[in-house]
């Protein structure tokens, strides 16, 4: 299959190009598009054939359902059984935005779209291109992140191209995404509601509206969870993994820098090529190695924005080992740490 590249201005997307993409969605095709978090790979959520193709293109396990994207709150009536009062509060405050909510699903939704579950994950993205595509398609759009399963999520059209060229109909190129990590997922099919995945909407913001929000243990997990604790299909699959081995070093800044120097030198002495994901404040400490700064420790949003791109970039330099600095688990830092821990396969070193 030939994959079309449709370049648009993210602020003022060319309607002609959006219509070309929407026509593909309506015919059951697959179109990658930018959202404010990461690029999504879209298919008509109500068309089981299209959703099957979506899983195939990504090589995604069939038991892991995508998020369904809509352009306005009234479109979710068709998809859900009911919306709890507390969820309405969050929808008013955070939609459109990087927040996905899980509800009991309605019978209108094909079972394939929700991987056989009785719940559905929904969000309204805060991005002109995504919203225009949903509106022009006149359908809810099922869209997981537009990477091959297991790879870091794509934050540029180029990343999508690297993973999915020849496997999908089109990629709408609207430039780099603003937030860089995926949406926060909150499950409202249980009471009290439970946060299943930290993401672009910080938990501190959610708790201002929802004091009894539970945190699933997976969110801060430092090792793989036993199967019986899994609440979201995505929790049991390998994620964000670069080709090289990734090691995460956590602790105070001084301890982290010391440990990374020691580790990276010992790898180099053994003949391994090392890539280091550092921060603006620490990168000067690491000579003789490939070093990239994720951003400033005083601006965790910048680190979130760069994270997946830099994992891909360092990996593509042919390093054998990537060593990443841990950052504080507050604000967007919680999502960053959750992704880094998963990317490392829980190879975590506690620096002292
Ligand atoms: O920011 C985002 O959320 C991006 C953009 C494209 O919107 N999408 C994204 O989708 O990250 P995906 O499919 O890569 O991640 C969706 C997560 C998975 O961990 C999946 O297991 C979980 O949401 N999920 C989907 N439906 C669910 C359900 N009914 N119950 C529990 N978890 C669910
Ligand atoms: Mg994903």
Image (spheres, rainbow, N blue to C red):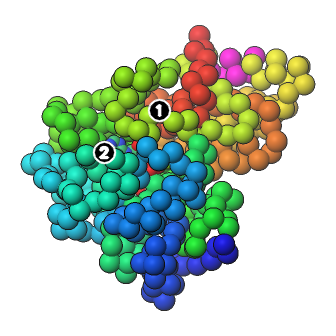
- Residue 248: image tag: none
Name of the residue lying farthest toward the left: 85
- The tag earlier along the polypeptide, 1 or 2, is 2
- Please report the bounds of the magenta region as a residue range: 256-262
Rendered view: 115 above or below 53: above
Q: Which residue is mark 1?
A: 236
Residue positioned 47% across, 59% down in the render: 52
Label 1 crowd (10 A; few <14 / some 14-19 / many >=20): some
Q: Position of residue 257 (x, y in %)?
A: 66, 22
Q: Position of residue 182 (x, y in %)?
A: 45, 49
Please indicate, yes or no, whether residue 78 appears anywhere in the rendered image. yes
Secondary structure beneath label 1:
helix
Camera-nearest residue between 262 and 85? 85
Camera-nearest residue between 270 and 167? 167
Please indicate, yes or no, whether residue 177 appears anywhere in the rendered image. no
Disc 1 CB within 8 Å of nearest ligand 1 atom: no
Label 2 crowd (10 A; few <14 / some 14-19 / many >=20): some
Residue positioned 13% across, 53% down in the render: 82
* Quadrant location of the N terminus in the rendered image: bottom right
* Quadrant location of the C terminus in the rendered image: top right
Rendered view: 60 above or below 21: above
Q: Which residue is mark 2?
A: 117
Q: Is residue 145 left or right of residue 102?
A: right
Q: Closer to us: mark 1 or mark 2? A: 2
Q: Is residue 74 left or right of residue 281?
A: left
Rendered view: 306 above or below 237: below
Q: CA distance from mark 1 to mark 2?
A: 16 Å
Q: Position of residue 270 (x, y in %)?
A: 88, 19
Q: Is residue 293 left or right of residue 190?
A: right
85 magenta-colored: no
């Amino acid at each position: 299959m030939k994959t079309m590249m449709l370049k648009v201005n993210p602020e003022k997307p060319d309607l002609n190009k959006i219509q070309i993409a929407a026509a593909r969605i309506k015919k059951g095709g697959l179109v990658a598009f930018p959202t404010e978090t990461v690029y999504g790979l879209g298919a008509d959520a109500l068309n089981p054939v299209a959703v099957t193709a979506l899983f195939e293109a990504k090589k995604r396990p069939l038991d892991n359902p995508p998020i369904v994207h809509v352009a306005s709150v009234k479109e979710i009536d068709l998809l859900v059984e009911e919306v709890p009062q507390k969820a309405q509060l969050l929808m008013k405050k955070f939609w459109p935005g990087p927040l996905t909510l899980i509800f009991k699903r309605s019978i209108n939704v094909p079972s394939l779209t929700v991987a056989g579950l009785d719940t559905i994950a929904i969000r309204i993205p805060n991005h002109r291109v995504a919203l225009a595509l949903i509106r022009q398609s006149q359908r809810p759009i099922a869209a997981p992140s537009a990477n091959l399963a297991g790879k870091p999520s794509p934050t540029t059209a180029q990343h999508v191209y690297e993973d999915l060229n020849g496997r999908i109909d089109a990629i709408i190129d609207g430039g780099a995404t603003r937030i860089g990590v995926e949406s926060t997922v909150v499950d409202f099919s249980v009471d009290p509601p439970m946060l299943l995945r930290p993401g672009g909407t910080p938990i501190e913001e959610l708790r201002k509206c929802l004091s009894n929000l539970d945190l699933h243990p997976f969110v801060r997990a430092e090792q793989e969870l036993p199967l019986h604790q899994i609440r979201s299909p995505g929790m049991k699959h390998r994620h964000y993994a670069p080709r090289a081995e990734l090691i995460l070093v956590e602790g105070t800044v001084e301890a982290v820098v010391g440990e990374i120097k020691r580790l990276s030198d010992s790898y180099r002495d053994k003949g391994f090529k090392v890539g280091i994901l550092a921060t603006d404040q620490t990168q000067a400490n690491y000579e003789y190695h490939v070093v990239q700064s994720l951003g400033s420790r005083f601006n965790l949003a910048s680190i979130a924005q760069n994270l997946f791109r830099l994992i891909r970039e360092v990996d593509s330099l042919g390093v054998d080992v990537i060593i990443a600095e841990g950052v504080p688990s507050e604000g967007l830092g919680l999502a960053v740490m959750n992704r880094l821990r998963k990317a490392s396969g829980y190879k975590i070193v506690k620096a002292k």
